[in-house]
């Protein structure tokens, strides 16, 4: 059984889908939900699935507290599902090819520092692009530049708003993220 930890900063709708998907898996379990926000709704969702949670400050993250916790809990894979802080390099190095992120656009477009959540969808809308989508990728030391594992696209029409683009992107994320994680994990 592999132990997965989810790192999330916000609502956690992706985290919920992942916890749902793996709750009866014989291959992997969600052993921890960790957040830098003590009031993030993702923590509520973790309680619902009886998954232990852990919160930390940015300072504690940089001081290695999360890495220590992940090691204590014998975590094999780290899943970033809407985690908005920069991951310290020693944490990335501790999970080589075992740290996965989801980005709400078709990387390399709309990636990089400061591009997250609704800011990405606003940028897509104002660009006039006719498609957007999701990218699931490995995390390395360069922001949003790790090896791409999976992408799926959605059409953007003139009548779309950043909000409707977000809905389309979330639908793709909820449809694919857990399955892609499952396909990466070896028994
Ligand atoms: C997701 O759309 C995810 O792709 C995005 O945050 C959202 C979290 O939603 N991540 C990033 O923008 C990372 N750069 P959720 O809390 O409902 O799962």
Image: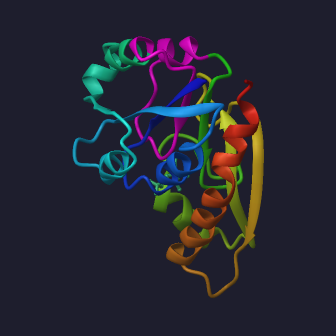
Magenta span has 77?
yes
The answer to which of 117 and 98 lies nearer the viewer is 98
In this picture, which residue range is highlighted in magenta? 71-95
Question: Residue at image x 36%, y 52%?
Answer: 45
Image spot of residue 101 (x, y percent): 59, 38
Question: Residue at image x 26%, y 22%?
Answer: 59
Instruction: Identify whether 146 is placed above or below 44.
Output: above
Image spot of residue 158 (x, y percent): 67, 85
Magenta span has 98?
no
Q: Is residue 115 visible?
A: no
Instruction: Identify whether 95 is placed above or below 106.
Output: above
Question: Residue at image x 54%, y 33%?
Answer: 29
Res. 172 image quadrant: bottom right
Q: Is residue 27 visible?
A: yes
Res. 156 image quadrant: bottom right
The answer to which of 97 and 124 lies nearer the viewer is 97
Question: Residue at image x 48%, y 16%?
Answer: 91
Question: Which quadrant would the N terminus be assigned to in this image?
Answer: top right
Image spot of residue 63 (x, y percent): 30, 13
Q: How many marks?
A: 0
Question: Is residue 16 found left or right of 176 in the rendered image?
Answer: left
Question: Which quadrant would the C terminus be assigned to in this image?
Answer: top right
């Amino acid at each position: 059984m592999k132990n997965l930890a989810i790192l999330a900063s916000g609502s956690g709708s992706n985290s919920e889908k992942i916890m749902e998907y793996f709750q009866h898996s014989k291959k992997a379990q969600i052993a921890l939900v960790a957040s830098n926000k003590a009031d993030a709704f993702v923590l509520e969702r973790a309680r619902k699935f009886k998954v232990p949670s852990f919160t930390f400050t940015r300072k504690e993250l940089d001081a290695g507290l999360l890495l220590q916790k992940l090691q204590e809990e014998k975590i094999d894979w780290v899943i970033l599902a809407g985690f908005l802080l920069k991951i310290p390099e020693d944490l990335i190095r501790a999970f080589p090819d075992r740290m996965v992120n989801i980005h709400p656009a078709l990387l390399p477009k709309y990636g990089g520092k400061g591009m997250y959540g609704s800011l990405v969808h606003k940028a897509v809308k104002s660009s006039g692009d006719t498609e957007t989508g999701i990218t699931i990728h490995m995390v390395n030391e360069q922001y949003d530049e790790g090896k791409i594992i999976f992408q799926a696209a959605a059409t953007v029409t003139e009548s779309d708003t950043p909000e409707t683009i977000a809905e389309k992107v979330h639908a793709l994320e909820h449809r694919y993220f857990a399955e892609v994680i499952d396909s990466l994990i070896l028994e």
